Image (cartoon, grey):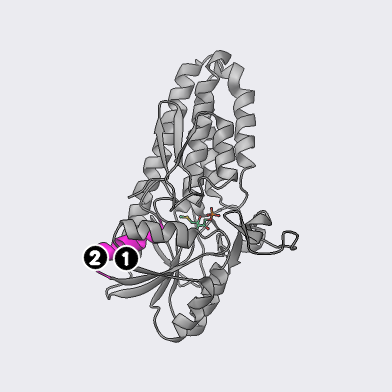
Amino acid sequence: MFAAMRYENYCLHLIDQRRLPSEETWLDCADLESVALAIEDMVVRGAPAIGCAAAWGVAIDAHNHKKLGTWAGYKTTFLASLERMARTRPTAVNLFYALNAMKRETESFDGAMAMVAIAERLIEKARFLSDDDIRTCKAIGEHGASLFNKPLHILTHCNTGSLATAGYGTALGIIRTLHDKGLVKNVWVDETRPYLQGSRLTAFELGQDKIPYSLITDNMAAYLMQLGRVDLVVVGADRIATNGDTANKIGTYGLAVLCRHHNIPFVVAAPKATIDFGIESGARIPVEERPAGELREIQGIAIAPADARVWNPSFDITPAELIYAIVTEDGVFKGPSFKLRA
Ligand code: MRU
């Protein structure tokens, strides 16, 4: 299974997901700013992976400021580093969950604590968050798979696999577990315009794991469902409100509407770290808008007039009423009236 990141000796190695599947290039991020830029530029993407990368970036930052001597000398810089990281991408709440976890770790530090010890504590915390994400994904896989006992044709959107998490995946974790149980007939992989996370990353991951899949463009899903060739749609999430409204990759809402029309279960898979316990509805989820170039060009080749006006929201909000179940590491929560609690 391909990993999105690897930490070694105060350096975060990130596979450059912009270049997959044609090239396997690793970027070495040895400071906070290079990790922040990697998140902004989509070198690393996917809600849980963004959170883990941010945590590693913050830990590496502490190591790089050893000269400041003590917590008293570093605290202001630390808070500014958290703020820088928080500005990278607005929608995936896992980023803020990870930054809060790093901040909470420092609450027991006293002013005289040495920077060497601080860096080690923050590295241990980043390692814990990463390992915990893998455990969480495996639990999501088991809980989600327990819903089904017949071989399925499954449709998924975007990339929610080991590239989008610390490993294994959320929606793709459920698909992996179903596959291990012999319950996957085929996975329909939505190409996922405009950034092509489906065709470039999900198809790549499924191929590596020898899980049978077929690639479709996003606008083929409706016809496939009309033909009765989809039994389940499973997607990940970037932020879930406590009523179950879910932000995920643009195109997700359309799939949920289609599922309702065709009576197909629409399942959301995400760690509890993706639930924003501070908001009770999707109306308050900030939706990132990405650059126009993502619609005007594909890998440098123009597919629209260079000056075409563009609207490029990266996510949409699926109302809870369209969601059959939300699967977290704690189990399966059936809709449509979710009351998610910490
Ligand atoms: O813009 P991206 O590629 O970061 O968006 C990713 C998604 O929307 C995923 O579906 C979501 O983060 C869940 S990943 C386990």
Percent across and percent down for residue 269 are: 43, 61
Mark 1 / mark 2, whichever is N-terminal: 1
Q: Are marks 1 and 2 in contact (CB under 8 Å)?
A: yes
Percent across and percent down for residue 242 are: 55, 60
Please determine whether, in this image, residue 151 is positioned above or below residue 116. below
Please determine whether, in this image, residue 251 is positioned above or below residue 69. below
For the point 32% across and 65% down, which residue is it?
Answer: 145
Percent across and percent down for residue 272 are: 46, 53
For the point 56% across and 34% down, which residue is it?
Answer: 34
Label 1: state its secondary structure: helix
In this picture, residue 156 sits left or right of residue 94 = left
Marks 1 and 2 sit apart, C-alpha to C-alpha, by 9 Å
Decide if residue 9 is in sight here.
Answer: yes
Residue 145, numbered circle:
1
Q: Disc 1 vs disc 2: which is toward the camera?
A: 2
In this picture, residue 27 sits left or right of residue 315 = left
Please determine whether, in this image, residue 218 is positioned above or below residue 270. below
The magenta stretch spans residue 299: no
Decide if residue 236 is in sight here.
Answer: no
Please determine whether, in this image, residue 249 is positioned above or below residue 56. below
Of 330 and 285, which appears nearest the observer? 285
Residue that numbered label 2 is attached to: 181
Q: Which residues are magenta?
A: 170-183
Of 245 and 176, which appears nearest the observer? 176
Q: How many callouts does the rendering have?
A: 2
Q: Is mark 1 within 8 Å of ligand 1?
A: no
Q: Is mark 2 within 8 Å of ligand 1?
A: no
For the point 52% across and 48% down, which residue is it?
Answer: 94
- Check disc 1 and give the amino acid type: Ala
- Check disc 2 and give the amino acid type: Lys
Q: Quadrant of residue 117?
A: top left
